[in-house]
Image (tube, rainbow, N blue to C red):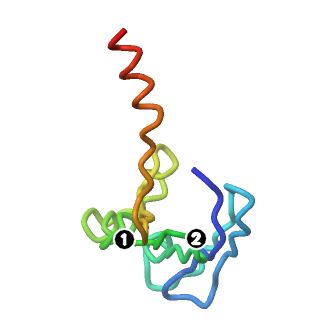
């Protein structure tokens, strides 16, 4: 994991938590202030700043929202025990292939 600049935003509230790109957290997210929901995490959205050469793609539906919709409970306990993938970065250009190390390994295996 690498730190990333951007925002953690609550869909139904005018609140967001800035991410400075230097820290992995922890971050205080005021999820208890989301009204009409049993779980504020279900409304959490990650909005990353531009990351050179990559584009962010959020998982749809969000696993945090799906947990509440499918089971009626909050994902807080789940993410306190294990990680949840909420999205991923996709390269926007051709990927660089590192072949140099592979050639060395092949030569060693042939000898």
Return the residue found at the far bottom.
Answer: 14
Q: Total marks drawn?
A: 2
What is the CA distance from the residue labelled 2 to the residue labelled 1? 25 Å
SS of the residue under disc 1: helix
Q: Residues within 10 Å of mark 1 (few under 14, many from 20)?
A: many
Residue 93 occupies quadrant: bottom left
Residue at which label 2 appears = 51
Q: Which of the 4 quarters of the picture holds residue 8?
A: bottom right
Q: Which callout, 2 or 1, points to the residue nearer the camera?
A: 2
Nearest to N terminus: mark 2 or mark 1 = 2
Question: Where is residue 4 shown, x and y percent of the image?
Answer: 63, 64
Residue reaching furthest left?
70
Residue 82 seen from this side: yes
On the image, the x and y values in percent for residue 35 come to 51, 85
Callout 2: few (<14), some (14-19), or many (20+) C-alpha neighbours within 10 Å? few
Q: Position of residue 48 (x, y in %)?
A: 57, 74
State the residue at coordinates (48%, 58%).
Answer: 76
The reply to whether the C-beta atoms of the residues labelled 2 and 1 are less than 8 Å apart is: no
The picture quadrant where one finds residue 47 is bottom right
In the image, residue 30 lies at what x, y percent?
Answer: 64, 73
Question: Residue at point 37% right, 8% down?
Answer: 111
Q: Is residue 17 left or right of residue 34?
A: right
State the SS at label 2. loop
Horizontally, is 31 left or right of 22 in the view? left
Q: Nearer the viewer, residue 38 or 80?
A: 80
The residue beneath circle 1 is 65
What residue is at 44 percent from the left and 85 percent from the top?
Answer: 36
Q: Is residue 32 visible?
A: no
**Depicted 48 relative to depicted 85: above or below:** below
């Amino acid at each position: 994991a690498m730190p990333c600049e951007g925002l953690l935003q609550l869909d139904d509230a005018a609140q967001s938590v800035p991410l400075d790109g230097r820290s992995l957290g922890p971050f205080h997210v005021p999820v208890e202030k989301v009204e009409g929901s049993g779980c504020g995490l279900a409304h959490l959205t990650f909005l990353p700043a531009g990351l050179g050469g990559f584009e962010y793609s959020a998982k749809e539906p969000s696993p945090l929202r799906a947990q509440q919709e499918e089971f009626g409970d909050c994902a807080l306990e789940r993410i306190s025990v294990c990680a949840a993938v909420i999205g991923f970065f996709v390269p926007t250009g051709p990927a660089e292939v590192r072949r140099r190390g592979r050639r060395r390994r092949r030569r060693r295996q042939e000898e």
